[in-house]
Amino acid sequence: MMHGITIRDQSFQMHYSGALFWEEKSILLISDVHLGKVSHFRKFGAAVPQQAIQKNFTAMDDSLETFLPKTVIFLGDLFHSHLNNEWKLFEAWVTSKTMDFILVSGNHDIISPLKYEALKIQILPELLLDGFLLTHHPEEREDYFNFSGHIHPAIRLNGLGRQSVRLPCFYKTNDQMILPAFGEFTGSYTMEPCEDCEVYALLGDAVLPVPIKEVKKKRRNRK
């Protein structure tokens, strides 16, 4: 189950994978996949399941098959660090697709641009498009609405007693939306919701609007 939202007269669909589809432009936004991170940690002895590598590609395929976008824009941190075996998997994945790819570079994107150019992936520091600013780090710029990543936002929901759960989320303010981290094994940062923000949590195959007033009320009652 997806969730639609209108921002500045443009229509967007939030996908449960963490991807965001811009309907009028047929653009799919994906942030913080961190390909190569699983292999990086496994190399140094971390007990990370090998299957986590394939989950990233399966999730990307799922979102692409859902929306059939003309363009995919990665909002930074596509690859976690230096080249490793996952790069070959990524090469095979990209060459099997027909849409255009753009990478708005993030702080982890240290692989040579020549490698991306060979795959016909355009690399940009940022992208301005019809009043929208696409970056990796969240930014505030007058007259623009900013889509970004980097933070890996999550929201903590409290239940009965002392029970709580932390879920990745889309985090929106008046002039900005921060996308959740798309990749497996990326970690997250718990956001403290502001009064006028909107939060959409990812839970299984659903995107769920979170009532911010209720979240803040429960937090006050727990103190």
Image (cartoon, helix red, strand yellow):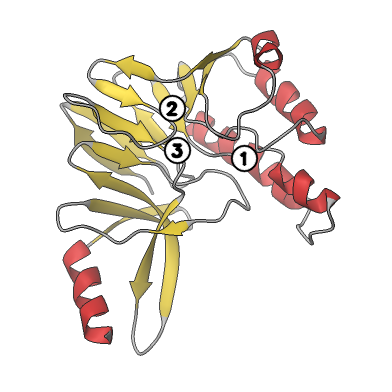
Contact, mark 2 vs mark 3 (Cβ under 8 Å)? yes
- Viewer-nearest residue: 209 or 199: 199
User: Mark 1 Cα within 10 Å, few/some/many (few <14, many 20+)?
Assistant: many
Residue 109 position within the rendered picture, expressed as x and y whole percent measured from the top left = 61, 29
The quarter of the image holding the C terminus is bottom left
User: Mark 2 Cα within 10 Å, few/some/many (few <14, many 20+)?
Assistant: many
Residue 3 position within the rendered picture, expressed as x and y whole percent measured from the top left = 31, 45
State which mark lies toward you, 2 or 1: 1
Contact, mark 1 vs mark 3 (Cβ under 8 Å)? no
Residue at 16 percent across and 67 percent down: it is: 213
Instruction: Provide the residue designation for mark 3.
Output: 19
Instruction: Provide the residue designation for mark 2.
Output: 28
- Callout 1: helix, strand or loop? loop
Residue at 63 percent across and 53 percent down: it is: 185
| Residue type at tag 2 | Leu
Q: Work out whether mark 2 precedes mark 1 in sequence or the reverse, and give the earlier one.
A: 2
Q: Work out whether mark 1 precedes mark 3 in sequence or the reverse, and give the earlier one.
A: 3
Q: Which mark is residue 34?
A: 1
Residue 126's quadrant in the figure? top left
In the image, is 100 to the left or to the right of 185? Answer: left
Residue 206 position within the rendered picture, expressed as x and y whole percent measured from the top left = 40, 54
| Residue type at tag 3 | Ala
Q: Which mark is residue 170?
A: none
- Callout 2: helix, strand or loop? strand
Above or below, 118 relative to 183 = above
User: Mark 3 Cα within 10 Å, few/some/many (few <14, many 20+)?
Assistant: many
